[in-house]
Amino acid sequence: MRHNLKRHLLVLAGLQILVFLLYHRILSMPFWSGEDVEILHDALNLSQDPAVLLRHIGSVFSQPILQLVFVLEFRSFGLNPAGYYAVNLALHGLNAFVLYLLVNMLFHRTRMALPAAVLFAASVGNYGKVLMSLAGQESLLLALLYLMVLYALIRADFKHHGRMTSPWFLIGLVLFGLAGLTRPALFSILLCLLAYKFFFYKERGGRGIFPPSILVLAAVGVLFAVFRELWGFRQPYIHFSEDQTVFTSAWLVVKTVFRYLNLMVFPMQVSDLLESTHPVVQQVYVWRVPIRVAVSLLIVSFSFFGFLFGSRPLRFFISWTFITVLPFSLTHLGSNWLNLQYLYLASVGFCVILAAGATGCAGLLEAHRWKRFVPWLAPLAFVLGTLSLNERLQVKNRAMGESPQIRTMVTMLQHRIDRLDP
């Protein structure tokens, strides 16, 4: 146990160092989003009386965990953006570490856990957009709770036969509740847990897929949904237009799922970045339709053969990728707009699949001195592409942060703070 603890702590430290090395330039970015300035205004209001969250029942079933985190950050950092971005990077490194623990527990090949965690730390699949804003902290915090819930509940299943009195199940239940107080994603977590119970049926000793523990978690999820509907801040989630039928809506959801999965592999859509990029990249975008069709066919074929011939952990993470992108594909049906932030959780599965493929191919070439490194060129290409796109996003956001509109908003907030100071 001491050896494992020491190794895990070294991995945690290494992943945090890697994240800060790759993305340290984000720390010097100004506030660039009007949404972030609004968050700071709300944090200022709540910092004067955080108990207001408990005096309004709608707030209790809104996002109290996230709001309290912003209050603590505001009291610590004020209007210094570096502090907020440092928290984002630390959360991202912690997410990569929990992913390492989860993969290490599920896969028999333990050496695969570190490459998957490193790819995720490099933001492969999500391109690091969530790291650059205060609003992105919602995705980071939810992902941390999401991963920790699954790790705790799966560990309870492995080590304690899923008993509801086991410490790991109780920890998972508490974290499940905290996740519900962060953002409505409880049923997505349950679907991933059911996928695990289905694919690991034999390893679990043939225990049922719907044990009492799942029913307890489902009941908690239903209660959260009811309380949000009755007393929470209600927001429309699925948007239907008048001319949409059930069939056309379902087709739009399927299309949007594959559009998001395409975005992880081929991150091109209409934006200011595309208009100012290299002519070669612009020409590639001209060919986007056949490229996206080819990528979609590749995703379908890989998923099909992965389910048929892949290991149980691989099937689980393929399912993870589809399950976690599905809720975001239900919003704004038919919209041409895609948000890279929504790929953060889905990219967990993508990184694991990429690491599994590279590790497996490298194992087949183990006897060859140099050829065994060839399979790692694909993950390396994704890392380099991610860092390049992230750099361009930083340049764009820095320019937005220097715009008169954002500077005026920050100045007005500073005046509010000055007036409140004794």
Image (cartoon, grey):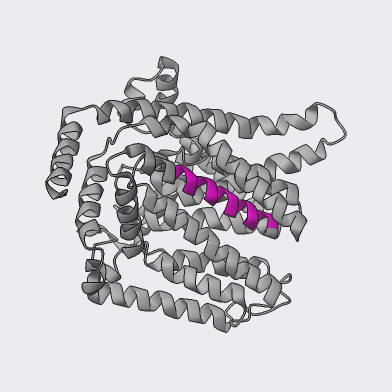
Main secondary structure of the magenta stretch: helix
Q: Is residue 258 visible?
A: no
On the image, the x and y values in percent for residue 112 come to: 71, 47
Seen in the picture, residue 91 relative to 125 is either above or below; the reply is below
Residue segment shown in magenta: 88-104
Q: Nearest the camera: 422 or 220?
A: 422
**Nearer to the camera, 400 or 4:** 4
Q: Determine the image quadrant of residue 211.
A: bottom right
**Name of the residue lying farthest toward the front:** 422
Residue shown at the point (62%, 68%) measured from the top left: 154
Residue 110 placement (x, y as % from top left): 74, 51
Q: In the image, what residue occupies the spot 46% across and 64% down?
A: 188
Instruction: Locate the N terminus by quadrant.
Output: bottom right
Q: For residue 11, say whether it is visible.
A: yes
82 or 407, nearer to the observer: 82
* Residue 89 lies in the magenta-colored region: yes
Residue 266 image position (x, y, % from top left): 48, 34
Position of 319 relative to 135 (above/below): below
Name the residue located 48 percent from the left edge and 38 percent from the top edge.
293
